[in-house]
Amino acid sequence: MARDWAHLFPRLPHRHNGLRSVIAAIGTRDYYRVRCGIGRPAGRMDAADFVLHDISAAERTLMPEFLSRCANAVEALLSSGLAAAQNEFHSAIPQEKI
């Protein structure tokens, strides 16, 4: 299964309730978004089942590096700005096959 890393986005359309609640809490749509994700399900697997399934022992070993890269993306966004952070984290995004 492919594991995505960090993606940084400027303001984008907000399609789910989690982002709507962020907008309501901060009172603006003007914010950056760092998305750290787990990729997409293979074949016809339901996306909700994929997201909510237990992670394997092999996947757990990747978590420290995954979380570190996500934290580094946030730090780069704050210290260097969106364009520089996107250039750093969107080029050659590492993917692990498990």
Image: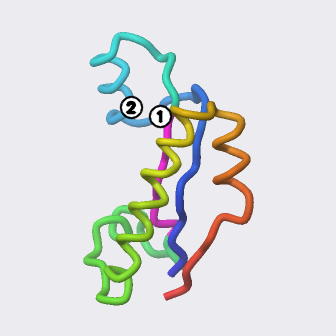
The quadrant holding residue 48 is bottom left
Q: Residue at x 51, y 71 (%)?
A: 3
Graded by Cα atoms within 10 Å as few (under 14), some (14 to 19) or many (20 or more), the crowding at tag 1 reads few
Magenta region: 33-40
* Most distant residue in the front direction: 79
Q: Is residue 13 above or below residue 71?
A: above
Q: CA distance from mark 1 to mark 2?
A: 7 Å
Q: Is residue 84 above or below residue 89?
A: above
Amino acid type at image mark 2: Leu
Label 1 with label 2: CB-CB less than 8 Å:
yes
Q: Residue at x 58, y 26 (%)?
A: 11
Q: Nearer the viewer, residue 55 or 17?
A: 55
Q: Position of residue 37 (x, y in %)?
A: 46, 59
- Horizontally, residue 7 falls left or right of residue 41, namely right
Graded by Cα atoms within 10 Å as few (under 14), some (14 to 19) or many (20 or more), the crowding at tag 2 reads some
Is 34 colored magenta in this rendering? Answer: yes
Q: Which residue is mark 1?
A: 15
The quadrant holding residue 22 is top left
Looking at the rendered structure, the secondary structure element under dot 2 is: helix
Amino acid type at image mark 1: Arg
Q: Which residue is mark 2?
A: 19
Q: Residue at x 40, y 36 (%)?
A: 16
Q: Residue at x 62, y 34 (%)?
A: 80
Snapshot colouring:
rainbow
Looking at the rendered structure, the secondary structure element under dot 1 is: loop
Q: Nearer the viewer, mark 1 or mark 2?
A: 2
Q: Position of residue 35 (x, y in %)?
A: 48, 47
Is 60 colored magenta in this rendering? Answer: no
